[in-house]
Amino acid sequence: DAGITQSPRHKVTETGTPVTLRCHQTENHRYMYWYRQDPGHGLRLIHYSYGVKDTDKGEVSDGYSVSRSKTEDFLLTLESATSSQTSVYFCASSSGQATDTQYFGPGTRLTVL
Amino acid sequence: QKEVEQDPGPLSVPEGAIVSLNCTYSNSAFQYFMWYRQYSRKGPELLMYTYSSGNKEDGRFTAQVDKSSKYISLFIRDSQPSDSATYLCAMSVHSNTGKLIFGQGTTLQVKP
């Protein structure tokens, strides 16, 4: 399995506070993705990156920003967390083609009170 | 209407049964079709991948794509308790971004 880790694994925060989630991969994959998973919605793409400093929006990007300063790290920031952002967040990485496997991290369970 | 629809279940079957999981989609531009398996409190992992229409078999698993009906299926033969998981279909239009649209996932329980 690809080496992809997420930190923290669990976080409880309060509405209005900033939150940063970290994804780290050791496969030198070009592409990295952030998804959120909610009951009734499956996995939805928040943002993705196709290289260092190259990022683009997914289908649910409002309220989220990302940064990628190194190939191996992809950060997801909630500038001012809201209760609607309570979710399980998954990071994934791949070589980049649609035919390539996306390898997922173990997820971060975020609760916004 | 969601681009990809998948019955969330739950689906409960006895061990040894044949399982059929399905997704429908609305975007005729989808060309790449995947099935991911997700165990409880784990990240999804790729199970099957199919390009365009047709069938693909891998052991006890068979993936089918019918683009004319905008319908994909995953069949599991001789189901085992270890197959108990959530199965997510995923689809993609573009080959150079890997952006996937996922279904809601179907939760499957195989009872011994």
Image (spheres, coloured by chain):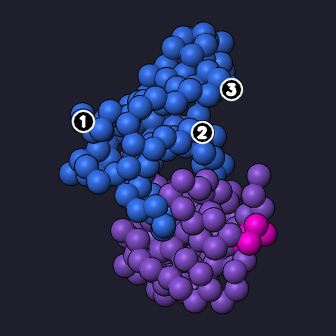
Chain colours: A purple, B blue
The residue nearer to you, when weighing A78 against A105, is A105
Q: Is residue A38 visible?
A: no
Viewer-side residue, A79 vs A62: A62
For the point 26% across and 52% down, which residue is it? B27
Compared to residue A26, the image places residue B60 above or below, namely above
The percent coordinates of residue B97 (x first, y second) are 48, 68
Considering only vertical position in the picture, is B17 above or below B90? Answer: above
Count residues near mark 1 (Cα–Cα under 10 Å), then give few for <14, some for 14-19, many for 20+: few
In whole angstroms, how far apart are the C-alphas of marks 1 and 3?
33 Å
- Front label number (2 vs 3): 2
In terms of image quadrants, where is residue B79?
A: top right
Which quarter of the figure is the C terminus of chain B placed in? Answer: top right
Query: Which three-letter amino acid code belongs to the residue tagged 2?
Result: Leu
Residue position marked by numbered label 1 in the rendering: B68
**Residue B26 falls left or right of residue A22:** left
Magenta region includes residue A25 = yes
Dominant SS in magenta: loop
In the rendered image, the vertical position of residue A7 relative to residue B34, given as above or below: below
